[in-house]
Image (cartoon, rainbow, N blue to C red):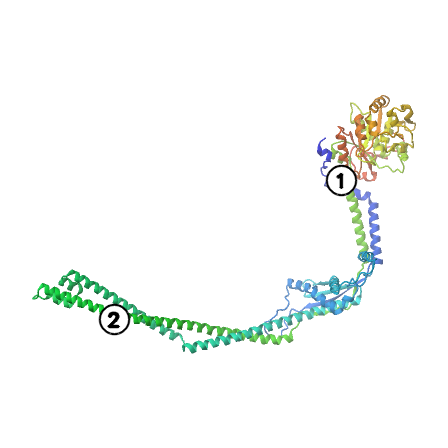
Amino acid sequence: MADDTMSGRQQPGRDEVDLSQAIGAIWSDRILILAFIAFAGLVGGVYAFHFSVAKYSATARIVLDVRSNDVIDLESAISGVSTDVAAINTEIEMIRSRELTEQLVDRLGLVEDPEFNVYLSERPGFSPVDWLQGVLRRGGEKPLPPLDIQRARTIAGVQGALTATAPKDTYIFNISFTTTDRRKSQIMANTLAEIYVQNQIDIKIAATETAVDWLSNRVTELDAQIEAKTDRIEEIRADGGLITRDTVDALVRQTTTMAERFEGFDEQLERIQSRLQQVDIAEKMGDPVAAADLLDDGGLIAIASRENISDQSRERQTRHRLATLRDAETARMAQIMRQRSAVEQSLADLRLSLARQNARFDELSRLVRDVEATTNLYGLFLSRLKELSLQIGIQQSDARVMSRASTSRKTEPQEARTIAFSVILGLMGGVGVVLLREFGLSVFRTGAELEAAFDHPSLGSVPKLPRKSPAQVIDHFVQDSVSPASESVRNLRTSLMMSSIDKPPQVIMSTSALPGEGKTIHSVALAISFARVGRRVLLIEADLRRRAIQEYFGLSPEVGFGALVAGDVSRTDVIVHDETLGVDLLLSGNSTANAADLFSSRRFRHLLSDLRKDYDIILLDAPPVLLVPDARIIGQQSDAILFSVRAGTTRRPQVAAGLRELTTVGLEPTGFVLSQVESAKRRYGRYEGYGNHAFAGKGYYGDARSRT
């Protein structure tokens, strides 16, 4: 068999809950559900009327004043409470805050109140926590913790008793306290409302004082800055005289004129240098006429135009004139150089003076602007400082107490609600247990689930019998042959014989995964059913350890099956015939032999071969396969194997493990038998499958008491 068969495949649709199946399960287990409801209601009633502590709630109301009440018409230094949703929620959290709760605890001395300081005494009424703490403290009284720890626990307790809400679309806050004392609830609600209103005033005063301190410091700093900058302005003016924009502009013009003059000297020097170069060229030319044309000098022109002088004299006069021109130009250039140097120095002095004057003028201008701006800011801060100083004594809260808590109402216990809630919990618990048992466990409820999980047919389902002893089981099948159980066994018998039409099984082994799954009942019931149709039936008690069949028939032989296999007795000595049932019985007796060795022996095989000749049906009630190996050995000699599974109890892994034990030795079960099915549940269609409709046919046969 495949691995998925051995592990138990998930049945298709198993995760889907059948509504009719769930309703059927709830209806069939209605007694259990009613028991849950009754128990929960009883517990809730006892708690509500005897153990719960009465609690009372008182509410004080605060209204947020959205109108401006400033005496002085000016922008408030510290803004009031905003009226948007976020601001309203913020104020609610402020009311619940630890800061205000601490003030309430300190003002009312709630650290000494046992209701909030759990260290002082146990809470009134029944409390599982107090009971457990009392058990743990039996060895002696536990010392009180430090005061800060007690105070922290008290604050937490007070916060737990506080409720703060804001009705929708209003500016009203409801402050409620729930305690065990009417008067205490009122006092705490009123006191916290007063603390909240006063806290708003204190916050605004503190913020205003902080603003006044800051403005005072800033005014002092600005005054010192104005004084320092004014001194610097006077220092600049005393050092450089009166510095104005006209003075700077005049100095700029003077500097520009001097720079232009300086540039004129450079032009003159360039011309002189060019003239000297022309003189040099004229000397090299040696021609008076050409020199006169080049230099355009009157003296050279006169020399060149004379006719009564010799060429040598003309040349000598020309050189002399050129030398004179050179000396004159050189002297002129030296003079210009001296003038240029003097102008350059004056220009440098002017530029340095201009830079200094510009720097002083810029600094002076900046200082003047700073003084003006600082003076304006100083005046603004000084004015605001005076205004805030006046506001310190006239601050008002943005909220006021609208109505004080004057009455208290009882909030706990609400007996009717407590009992109703307990009943609902009981109903939910009962239904939950039923549905968990029905759907949550990995068990089988129908033969179809077994077939889908392990690919083996379900041969039938046998209902749970209303019995008190094994003998009553036999009486049920004998005396009531038309009962649902009897009809289920007949269907099982038919399915078993039809499992192999060509060669119906003769030796049938009945086993299961674990004890208590109904395999012995199935063996006995099948023996009776086969005997009713005229078959020669031998029922063998192959479970030598349990010996369950002996209990059903009230027999306790000393020797039996074990002695027969061992060859110590003959068949006639140990086989018992039941005249009422028409069944032969081969019980185990008090054998001490090892069961596995007996079933593995050649004598056992020979015995079965001999018994096949004398009986039409041989039923062997074998032990569970997960406990001992006997069933795996007996199955080797069997024609059919019935595997019993208890409905709603045997888990899927257990069935898979039992089948795996059989397949390891090459055995395959002929089919499953779903046992101990509750007949009341089957009427709701929970158990479908072959042979399951017998439950609906109890009245079909009338009062007949004999049916094969």
Residue 504 is marked as none
Residue 335 is marked as 2
Image coords of residue 93 (percent x, y): 68, 63
State the residue in front, 243 or 396.
Answer: 243
Residue under numbered circle 1? 442
In this picture, residue 702 sits left or right of residue 15: right
State the residue in front, 614 or 574.
Answer: 574
Quadrant containing the C terminus is top right
Tag 1: residue type? Ser
State the residue in front, 486 or 451.
Answer: 451
Q: Are marks 2 and 1 in contact (CB under 8 Å)?
A: no
Instruction: Count neighbours of disc 2 (C-alpha within 10 A) and say few if under 14, some if 14 to 19, many if 20 or more.
Output: few
Tag 1, which secondary structure?
A: loop
Q: Is residue 72 visible?
A: no
Tag 2: residue type? Gln
Tag 2, which secondary structure?
A: helix
281 to 592, vertically: above or below: below
* Distance from the alpha carbon under mark 2 to that under mark 1: 126 Å
Circle count? 2
Q: Is residue 418 visible?
A: yes
